[in-house]
Amino acid sequence: MIYLVGAGPGDPGLMTLRGREVLSKSDVVIYDRLVGDGVLAMIPESAEAIDVGKIPGSHKISQRDIEDLIITKAKSGRNVTRLKGGDPFMFGRGGEEAEAIMRAGLDFEVVPGVSSALAVPAWAGVPATHRDFCGGVNIFTAHDKDNMIPDFEDATSIFLMGVGNSGELQRRLLTRLEAKTPCAVIANGTTARQRVIRTSLGHLHEACGEISPPAVIVVGKVAELNLDWRGKLPLSDKKILITRPAGRSETLAAMLRDAGAEVVAMPTIKTSVIKNSLDEDISGFDWVGFTSVTGVEAFFTLLSESGRDVRELGSARIAAIGKATAEALRSHGLRVEFVPEVFDGKNLAEGLASKTDGKILMFRALDGTPEIAKVFEAKKITYKELCVYRTDYVKLNHVPDTDMIIFTSASTVRAFAASVSGMREVRAVCIGRQTAEEAGRVGFVDVVVAERATVEAIFKACCS
């Protein structure tokens, strides 16, 4: 994958979050002279960093060679970040590089940057616009490809909030420009609802009548270009709501954004440790099971707060409900000896019941699924459950229209239903049978179940 990334005007704090995100996972970084030192310091130590900066009058590498370098590195199977000062499409020759990448048949993403054209004056206390002094700004380069000051009549003009007044805007522009001048109207830019209408100045007003604000109007020859990188991504027209607790959605959100989705992280539940819930004897058990990552974290928090440690579990063998929970246990130095094929409470309990007729201790959430206890009781297994954390609903004040909602537990479904009365026609992407059954119970009709209770499986289900 190739990323054309705007590094901003220099200060690392002015680089976008998306820019930082893709830079952090880069295998190759090809950077310009004007990228700030603080941004360059963010390049991963493992990445190959290549300086292709151009000094006026002395270009160590030609633009064509830069384009060939980007393509060659990407064809080797590595993530390539083309890091450019400011914004890649603002006098940064990013458009030329995007065209070269498209001709090579490779995928790419444009990560806009904060342009120095607006940021540097603002940083110095000089506003580019002010209601008492001017009504807009045109941005020019001081020299074109022939090192000449460009003809101002050939400049691109960009208009914000122009849809409602497009008729008058068109009339005034036609006094200076030809009716065939290319125009592009971009509505709901950078969102899943983005729509682009390409037209001419003579039909601008008519085109604006087909969309609703907000929109940006671009007038000039560049409006003929179509360097659409998002349209090929599988989720480019999807807005996806993730209901996982805060801090649990980053990996999944990044995968969905990479696939083109507009992602809204909106936790419907929050968890908290139940104080004193571990004030009992936890020794003498043959197996100890954990039903979630949160349960693992709560267990170790409670141990630490009470001045105890994991040795109290003695020789008990450790089981986890799924891969993520097992990884959380391993990070604390515990060896996990059993993870069920299907990551849910019923399969965890049945697996443990088949492995022992001894005593089992389970760490779980208050008001969690009763299926574990039902399995143990049916098989006459001696067990004990300790509820080490609780789950509370988060009140959702504003829920945007969306195409999919991801639910990772039955409690996230119940919490959503408690806050939102409608939206049951939206696709519900669920982890596991229990979560899917709860989604159906509260009224969702289009329910998709991930093949496994993993982030990768959820992502696959969203793309299906």
Image (cartoon, grey):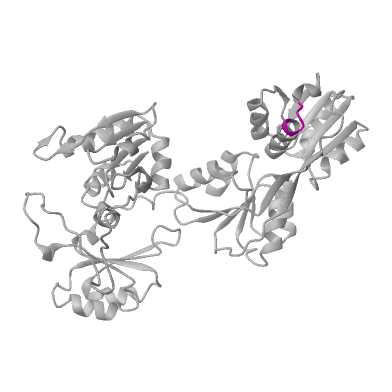
Residue 61 visible from this viewpoint: yes
Please name whichever residue, 45 or 80, is drawn nearer the observer in this view of the structure: 45
- In the displayed image of the protein, which residue is found farthest to the top? 315
Residue drawn at 39 percent across, 31 percent down: 44
Please name whichever residue, 421 or 17, is drawn nearer the observer in this view of the structure: 17
Residue drawn at 85 percent across, 37 percent down: 385
Please name whichever residue, 78 or 54, is drawn nearer the observer in this view of the structure: 54
Residue 464 visible from this viewpoint: no
Q: Can you say whether 212 is above or below 258 in the image? A: below
Q: Where, by quadrant of the figure, is residue 321 drawn?
A: top right
- Indicate the quadrant containing the N terminus: top left, top right, bottom left or bottom right: top left
Q: Can you say whether 155 is above or below 262 in the image? A: below
Please name whichever residue, 244 or 403, is drawn nearer the observer in this view of the structure: 244
- In the displayed image of the protein, which residue is found farthest to the right? 380
Q: Report how many numbered discs are placed on residues in the image.
A: 0
Residue 155: % across, % down: 16, 62
Q: Left or right: 397 with respect to 205?
A: right
Q: Left or right: 296 with respect to 148?
A: right
Residue 426: % across, % down: 60, 60
Residue drawn at 91 percent across, 37 percent down: 377
Residue drawn at 63 percent across, 61 percent down: 396
Q: Left or right: 383 with respect to 444?
A: right
Q: Where, by quadrant of the figure, is residue 276 drawn?
A: top right
Residue 428: % across, % down: 63, 55
The main secondary structure of the magenta stretch is loop
In the rendered image, residue 427 lying in the magenta stretch gets the answer: no
The residues colored magenta run: 304-308
Residue 319: % across, % down: 75, 28
